[in-house]
Image: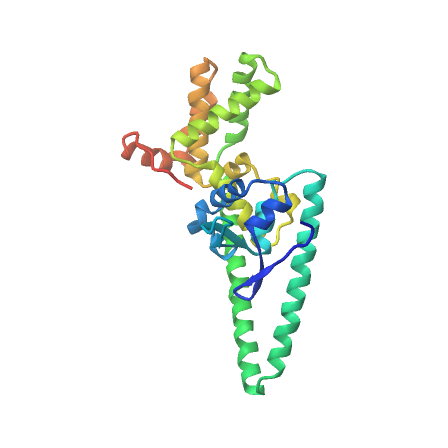
Amino acid sequence: MNDIILSTQNGKPVASSRQIAESFGKEHKHVLRDIENLIGGESKIGLSSMFFKSEYISAQNKKLPEYLMNRDGFTLLAMGFTGKAALEWKLKYIAAFNEMEKKLSTRAASQLQDLSPELQYLIKLERQQNQQAKQLEQVNERLDFACEAFSLTAGPDWKKACQSAISSVAMKHGGDGDDFESVWNEIYDAMERRGFDLELRVSNAKARALKNGISPSDVRKITKMKIIEAGDKKLIAAFVDSVRELAAKAGTRVDRLDEVCQTSLFAAAAAQRNTTSGKFVKEV
């Protein structure tokens, strides 16, 4: 199939998960799985405005699920598709979205001209208000991100202490790249046990970045460690605690990590852990 056929949803062009699966040479069930993994944190980041669950009738006359997605949803989904052929299809879909958006815009402008001046004014006023509300939402999100980032500079040099401990543990295991990767995976697993879903946080952050107009190349730079660095005190405290646990288990020095954990930056998080009697509530 060479032609890309887009439909519309809420007045915007959308592509179907079935067509995307066929274009990129993937099984539809795998594309559905990837989409559902993305929208697992929908209540946090509002992915319902990017993906729309639908149904189609199969050749066996059965109702089966599919998803429709707008440009943002397609960009988020296709971010993980790699290879020369995948790049060509991404460009084709972008061109198809551009063409469809242009047609819809021209049609809307034509329909607007057929209305009375009074109705045209009211419609334009509503559009301006919606645009202002959207801009305000984006400003608030950027402000939230800046406030989170500020927490990094408010405390001790926890990153250096953690990096030193991680290096020491990895060197005890041999010191090559696989050893460092294994140590990092153990730390992330420990954070998962403490109730912090870093995979979901990365997906949420990437979706928010795309929504705010961040380039796909910069979005791909968002990693678990970047999420931790930009996180709140509880997230950073959980990371330091996980590193300390692993370092103590490996028999390396933890005195610098103990100094970090005793500072005011982690006091509130430590107090909360004590009140839960060792039970962690999953946070995303």
Q: Is residue 53 visible?
A: no
Question: Is 32 placed above or below 251 here?
Answer: below
Question: Is 230 placed above or below 253 here?
Answer: below
Q: Residue furthest front?
A: 60
| Percent coordinates x, y for residue 83 in the rendering | 69, 38
| Percent coordinates x, y for residue 126 in the rendering | 52, 75
Residue at x-position 63% and y-position 73%: 107
In this rendering, the count of numbered labels is 0
| Percent coordinates x, y for residue 233 in the rendering | 43, 39
Q: Is residue 260 left or right of residue 26?
A: left
Residue at x-position 56% and y-position 18%: 179
Residue at x-position 60% and y-position 79%: 112
Q: Which is more toward the observer, 10 or 283?
A: 10
| Percent coordinates x, y for residue 160 in the rendering | 55, 27
**Which image quadrant: the C terminus?**
top left
Q: What is the quadrant of residue 14 in the picture?
A: bottom right
Q: Is residue 233 left or right of residue 111?
A: left
Question: Is 82 placed above or below 250 here?
Answer: below
Q: Is residue 3 left or right of residue 63?
A: right
Q: Which is more toward the observer, 27 or 83?
A: 27
Question: Is 45 placed above or below 239 here?
Answer: below
Q: Which is more toward the observer, 142 or 11?
A: 11
Q: Is residue 77 visible?
A: yes
